[in-house]
Structure formats: C-alpha cells, structure tokens
Amino acid sequence: MTKLSFVIPCYRSQETISTVVDEIERTVAALGAYDYEIILVNDSSPDDTFSVISALAENDRHITAVDLAKNFGQHAALMCGMRRSSGEIVICLDDDGQTPADEVGKLLEKIEEGYDVVYASYGHKQHSGFRNFGSRVNAKMTEIMLGKPRELSLTSYFAAKRFIIDEMLRYENCFPYVMGLVLRSTKNICNVTVNHRARELGQSGYNLGKLLGLWMNGFTSFSIKPLRLATYFGALTAFAGFIYALVIIIRHFTVGLAPLGWSSTTALLLILGGIILLVLGLIGEYIGRIFMCVNDSPQYVERQVVSGKKD
C-alpha cells in the first residue's frame, strides 16, 4: 500500500489546523488505497499552535508534531517536515484551509500518470491583492532566474515522488528555497487545477519584508544571473561613458563647445554611484550567504517532537 506524507508548516493556525487535519483524514479514508502520515511543523508561532498540534499527535498515531526553536520561515519548516517524512509520495499544503485537501486525489492521479511533481493551480486566487501581486513577481523571478517554464504555476500546494524529496534533502545549507530545489531536480512537472478557498480566519503570514527575503533566497541561492546581469550592465555603462567622452572631445575641437553645468555632472555621478553601490551590495549578499553556509548556520532547529501514539 502506497504511503502518503502530508507536510504542513504551521504559523498562527491554532484555530484552523484541526479542520485541515480532519479534512485530510476524511479524504484519505475516502480514497481507500493509501496509508498516510501527517507532519505538522510549528514555525515558532506566537500563539498556541504547538499545544493544538501536539494534542492532535498524542491522540493519533498518524500525526507527528514538531516545534522549531525560532521562526526559520516556511521553506525551512517544509524541509524539516520532508526530512521526517517516510511516504512514497509527499504532499505539501497550507495550514489555513485555503488549499483544498479534499482535492488531493487530482494531484495523485497526475503522479500516477508518471509526473515527478504536480503543482496545484488556481483559476481564481482568494488571496489579498498584495499577496497576489507578490505571487506574480515571484513567478516572473523564477522564470528569469531559475528557468521556470512560463506556463507552469508554482504554488504552496504540491505533491512529489520520494526520489525528488530525497534529492531536495541533499541541500543542507541555510536559506532553502523549495521551488528552486524542485526546478533543479526535475523538469517532469505539471499543473492540475483545484479550487482556492477564501481565508476564514486570520491573515497571511507574509509581509513585504518576508516576501523580499524569499525572493532574495531564490535568486542568490540557485542562480548567478544577477551577477551576470550586473556585469553586462557595468559593461554597457562603461561603453556609454566612452562614447560620451568621445562626443565631448569631438565637440571641443570641431565646434569649440563642451557641456557646462554642475547639474548634469552631479546627476551622472549619482547614477554611477548608485549602480556601483547596488552591485557591491549584490556581491556582498552572495558573500554573506557563502560565509553563513561555511559556518554551518542551521537550516532549522527542532525544540521538541511529539509523535503519534502507537496501536
């Protein structure tokens, strides 16, 4: 019997996670052909989330609750859950009930057709306008930096075969980016359309700072294209400066004129100075992440694990 592993990062979900777990259990029972486990990872939520998920684990042998020592982020929590999973197929979804666990059968059908990874896609997202904008920016970033096919939609609800998960778990450095790990492991990926529910309680844990950090993880951990773009832009700027210098010399000897005024000079210096600082900051970001990886900064730290009772 094929075993499914459901991995759910939990943050501020004390009111919703029980409903999500109940829905998973009803759905798997209806499918009938699968064994399953549910791994709930509390990402140092400030509310009572861990008490809720630990109570669930104590009363159900299928559930494991993990409490992280501090907030490491959704992707680190996913890596933690994946590392504790043992199923032949791993399904990752959200803790707020917006990702429909009762439609997991659609993802499993595509896995059985031979796809390595199946992502849920949504006809109409029920996120806020800010979150939808962030998702569009993230999609464009993964296209440019990581080579994601334009027609492929990457979301937080997906199913993957065991060998893909094992390959992803070979990445043990800090700053994990799950989408990047998937894209570098396989191209045999597809989408399946599911409904996206409106949020009933609370609000998204992603703010502008977390979204920017997520994007930075994506293109500094899995691509050198930003550095390459900086090189091209620097070469273009130098070429433009060389042409401008030639124009000044020619105008001086042919017409006797040269550009005057501090305004144009100051503007040019500000532009070039900004470009230089931007490139230096980008290089510093890469070097800083290399430094943290060399010093073995942890991907996550588990404070406590509550495993389900055995029959």
Image (cartoon, rainbow, N blue to C red):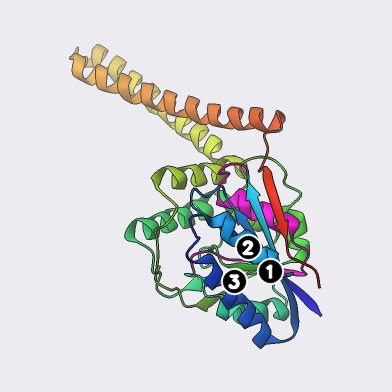
Residue that carries the numbered disc 1 in the rendered image: 59
How far apart marks 2 and 1 lie (CA) works out to: 7 Å
Dot 2: element: helix
Stretch of the chain drawn in magenta: 69-96
- Could you tell which of marks 2 and 3 lies nearer the N-terminus? 3
- Please tell me the numbered disc located at residue 90: none
Residue 124 picture quarter? bottom left
Residue that carries the numbered disc 3 in the rendered image: 21
Residue that carries the numbered disc 2 in the rendered image: 55
In the image shown, does 59 or 99 lie closer to the viewer? 59
Q: Are marks 3 and 1 in contact (CB under 8 Å)?
A: no
User: Is residue 177 something one can see in this rendering?
Assistant: no
Q: Are marks 2 and 1 in contact (CB under 8 Å)?
A: yes
Above or below for 297 versus 175: above
The number of numbered discs placed on residues in the rendered structure image is: 3
How far apart marks 3 and 1 lie (CA) works out to: 12 Å
**Magenta segment: does it hold 19?**
no
Residue drawn at point x = 54 percent, y = 26 percent: 284
The type of residue carrying mark 2 is Ala
**Magenta segment: does it hold 75?**
yes
Residue drawn at point x = 62 percent, y = 52 percent: 77
The type of residue carrying mark 1 is Asn
Residue drawn at point x = 51 percent, y = 46 percent: 214
